[in-house]
Image (cartoon, grey):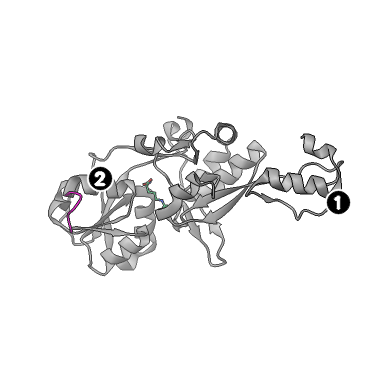
Amino acid sequence: RRFLQTSGLMAAAVLLAACGKKEAAAPMDAASASASAPAAAVVYTVGTDAAYAPFESQNEKGEIVGFDIDVVSAAAKKAGIEVKFVNTPWEGIFNALGQGDRDLLVSAITITDERKQTMDFSSPYFDAQQLIAVKDDSKVGKFDDLKKLKVGVQTGTTGDEVVTKLIGKTSTAIKRFESTPLALKELESGGVDAVVADNGVVIHYVTNNTGAKFKTVADTSFTPEQYGIAVKKGNTELLEKINKGLADIKADGTYAQIYSKYFGAAPAAPAASN
Ligand code: ARG
C-alpha cells in the first residue's frame, strides 16, 4: 500500500479515491488515515432480493436475514473481507452487478450457462429444484398438467424459464410477478392456478402460511439447480476470496451448522462439497 507513505489528509483523499464506490468501514478522519494506521477496510456491497425466505428476507426490524446472508457473512469472515447487504430488486439485480453498483450478489441465484456469459459464479453452495405450489384441492399431479392452466412465476427466474418453455413465451397463461411472494399471494386469491418456484422458498411459504391451503407437487422432469454467489465478470480476485471462504466454512462445519439452522437436517454430502 504505497499510498500510506503520503501523509495526513492527502492519504485520506488518495485512499478514498482508490476505494472508488466502496465505503470505508469506519468513519475516515485524518487520524485514522495517518501513515501509521492500517488502510481502512473496503466494504464489499452484496446485492440480494430480500423477499425470498428462508434465503433472504427482511425481519421486523428491517434487517436482511436468511441462509444466504449467514453463508456469505461466514465465508467473508474467513476470507478476511467485510460485506454489507443491500436489498436489491431481482429485476435489476444483474445490471447492478454489471454496472459496479454491487460487488457481489447472493440471492438464491441458480448458476446457468446463460448467466455465466455475463457474470462469474462462486462454487455452488446450495442444491435446489423447481417445485409446484397449488391449492389443496387442485388436480395438478405433474408439471405437464400446467399446460392449460394459469401459472404464476417471478419474472426472470429459472421458474419463469421452465414455465415459459412449457407454455410458450407469448402465452397469456403465464403471469409474471416482481417477487415470488406476490405470485404466491395471487395463488391464494385464485388469480393463478399454480406457482412454480424454487423448492426451498415454496416449502417455506406453504409451511408458514397454512391458512393459504396450499400443497406442493414435485416433478422429476425439473433439472437440478445449484446456487452460486455472483461477481462481476472477470473479478477473479474477489471470486477467489469468496471461494476460499466457502471452502473453509464447508470444511470446518460452519456451513453444516448454518444449513441445519434453516433446513433442520445436515446437508447431503454432494450439496455441501461440490
Ligand atoms: N433460483 C432462481 C433463479 O436463479 C430464483 C432466485 C430468486 N431469488 C430471489 N431472491 N428472488 O432464477
* CA distance for labels 2 and 1: 56 Å
Q: Main secondary structure of the magenta part?
A: loop
Q: Position of residue 82 (x, y in %)?
A: 65, 45
Residue 142 shows in this picture: no
* Quadrant showing the N terminus: top right
Query: Which residue is disc 1 drawn over?
Result: 31
Label 2 element class: helix
Q: Position of residue 47 (x, y in %)?
A: 51, 51
Could you tell whether 236 is left or right of 204 in the image?
Answer: right
Whether residues under marks 2 and 1 lie with C-beta atoms below 8 angstroms apart, the answer is no
Query: Which residue is disc 2 drawn over?
Result: 162
Label 1 element class: loop
Mark 1 neighbour density, 10 Å: few (under 14) some (14–19) many (20 or more): few
Question: Disc 2 residue type?
Answer: Val
In the image, the residue with mark 2 has its CB under 8 Å from the nearest atom of ligand 1: no
- The segment highlighted magenta reads 168-172
Could you tell whether 56 is left or right of 151 in the image?
Answer: right
Tell me the number on the disc at residue 165: none
Could you tell whether 81 is left or right of 6 in the image?
Answer: left
Tell me: residue 246, above or below residue 41. above
Question: Disc 1 residue type?
Answer: Ala
Taking the spot 14% from the left edge, 50% from the top edge, the residue there is 145
Taking the spot 44% from the left edge, 32% from the top edge, the residue there is 269
Residue nearest the viewer, comparing 36 with 3: 3
Q: Position of residue 205 (x, y in %)?
A: 37, 59
Residue 61 shows in this picture: yes
